[in-house]
Amino acid sequence: MKNVVLIPDSFKGTMSSEEICAIMERSIKVHYPDASVTSIPVADGGEGSVDAFLEALGGERRTLTVQGPYG
């Protein structure tokens, strides 16, 4: 059995790292149906970073209204 680890970053403005993982995993499974695939979405500190952290750590997004930069 093949073991595959996917660790993609997002494609700016087009796909998130989670979407890329899903596409890559589907493609791998076409050719290697019994492969064990581990997906680890990452980000380089820019676009998609918050989503990658939330996915990795099981967090949730919360929206707040503040009066200025100090709360």
Image: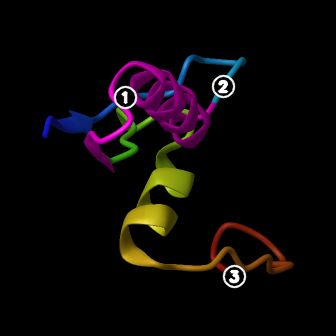
Q: Secondary structure at mark 2?
A: loop
Taking the image as shown, residue 58 lies to the left or right of residue 12, namely left
Question: What stretch of residues is rendered in magenta?
Answer: 16-38
Pointer 2 or 1: first along the chain: 1
Taking the image as shown, residue 49 lies to the left or right of residue 42, namely right
Distance in Å between CA atoms under marks 2 and 3: 32 Å
Taking the image as shown, residue 14 lies to the left or right of residue 5, namely right
* Residue type, numbered disc 2: Met
Tell me the quadrant of the picture where the C terminus can be found: bottom right
- Does the residue at mark 2 contact the one at mark 3 (Cβ under 8 Å)? no
Q: Secondary structure at mark 1?
A: loop
Residue 17 to residue 58: above or below: above
The location of residue 35, given as percent across then percent down, is 27, 39
Q: How many marks?
A: 3
The location of residue 39, given as percent across then percent down, is 35, 46
Closer to us: mark 3 or mark 1? Answer: 1
Closer to us: mark 2 or mark 3? Answer: 2
Residue wearing tag 3: 71
Residue wearing tag 1: 8
Pointer 3 or 1: first along the chain: 1
Q: Secondary structure at mark 3?
A: loop
Residue wearing tag 2: 15
Query: How dense is the environment of label 2, judged by Cα within 10 Å: few (below 14), some, or many (20 and up)?
Result: few
Residue at position x 61%, y 36% in the image: 19
Magenta span: predominant SS is helix
Taking the image as shown, residue 55 lies to the left or right of residue 4, namely right
Distance in Å between CA atoms under marks 3 and 1: 35 Å
Q: Is residue 22 magenta?
A: yes
Q: Is residue 31 magenta?
A: yes
Distance in Å between CA atoms under marks 2 and 1: 11 Å
